[in-house]
Amino acid sequence: MPPDSFTDEGPALGEDDAEDLLRGICFKTGPPRTVGVELEWLVHDLHSPERSVPARRLEEAFDGLRTLHLQSALTFEPGGQLELSSPPAASLMECITSTAADLDAVRPALRTSGLALAGLGQDPWHSPQRMLREPRYDAMETYLDRIGPAGRAMMRSTASIQVCLDAGHEEPGPLGYGRRWQLAHLLGAVLVAAFANSPMRENRLTGWRSTRQALWTQLDPARTTAPPVRREPRGAWAAHALDTPVMCIRAADGPWAVPERLTFRDWIRSGLPRPPVRADLDYHLTTLFPPIRPRGHLELRMIDAQPGEDGWMVPLAVTTALFDDPEASETAYRTVKSLAETAGSRPAPRNLLWLNAARHGLADPELHTVAAACFAVALEALPRIGATPAVQEAVAAFNDRYVLPGRCPADDLGTPVNGKDLRT
């Protein structure tokens, strides 16, 4: 590829310039005012969900969806998953109302094609073929195949709920960006455990309540783990992004190169096969998949897709309440901090805590205790952040059905524990 193929995208990026950009664009501070949600859904046959849907049938149905007037951005994942990304909303209820309206438009349109949305973190029946044939997905698959088969499974057969919240105040305190960054990482394992909803793969129980989260642990750790959380977030994230290997190098024509062990910092320093520009850094950030990704706001990426038409509202409401209500945020921080301190006596505490959450859900006694406390705090905070009685009732019902008894949605699908099937 000629070295000047991307000169129209700006000058070559220097190391100091890249670090300054990362510090400036990844944590945009101010009072927490907006909330958003990204909902991924598996798409199944309406009457026989266990039957594989041909790619052509999905493509025809998706073409029809593109004519809908939606407030959310509508996109599709490589395995045919459907994603709705809400615009930033001024409140929890504004986000819920607009997203629910979009789903009310999408669902009947899919039904006319004999299809339905399925709220599961991992496709329990199929290993779909990759539908999207684009250079970036070709390159991603090549990169992930070097590590193992989990990458293809993640791309093609998983679905999540991603809650997006403002980074927070510049100043310290319960709503400061440093505290919210720590809270997100401490609370993450609790959210994995409470909302685990992917116990099956290829018609078999996997032994994990969140098979989706288990798959993430098998991917490139440089891309999927967080930088040191106790360090100042801007500097830690900037160093992490620059020192993570480049997944691919964009090309104007033909396939994208997939280098081995070339960090973005090394790419800047070498300038080969061409000097990187700002757009390359922007793209590189989209290939990092930590559980909490700073994109100006905080993107919490660890929650499995939820069952039912409205199940997605519960993790959105709970997470928003624990972050954006000052009293709830402070109480939740103290609660989850005690869990991390308890785990500190274990080997590899943070990793083990997340593994326990994915494998055992709320059957883990420590995660159960902390989840029950966090849900109680969230239920108290929901009226203060304007949640309607219907949303409060949905969270209370989830709490009664799953959290208080130490269960999660995966248990309804039959996750084995100690050799026993918990199918209900």
Image: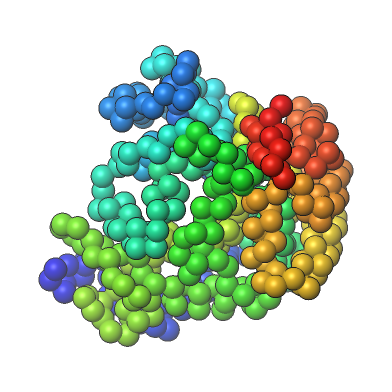
Residue at the image position 79 percent from the left and 32 percent from the top? 401
Screen quadrant of the N terminus: bottom left
Does residue 409 sit above or below 353 in this rendering? above
Q: Going by the image, does 272 lie left or right of 289?
A: left
Can residue 386 be seen from the camera position used here?
Answer: no
> Residue 234: where, in percent of width, then height?
58, 74
- Which residue is nearer to you in this view: 30 or 249? 249
Does residue 323 sit above or below 422 in this rendering? below
Residue at the image position 33 percent from the left and 54 percent from the top? 141
Residue at the image position 36 percent from the left and 43 percent from the top? 78
Q: Going by the image, does 162 lie left or right of 353?
A: left
The answer to which quarter of the image holds residue 399 is: top right
- Which residue is nearer to you in this view: 283 or 370? 370
Does residue 10 sit above or below 84 in this rendering? below
Screen quadrant of the C terminus: top right
Can residue 132 be seen from the camera position used here?
Answer: yes
Residue at the image position 41 percent from the left and 16 percent from the top? 114
Q: Going by the image, does 157 lie left or right of 355?
A: left
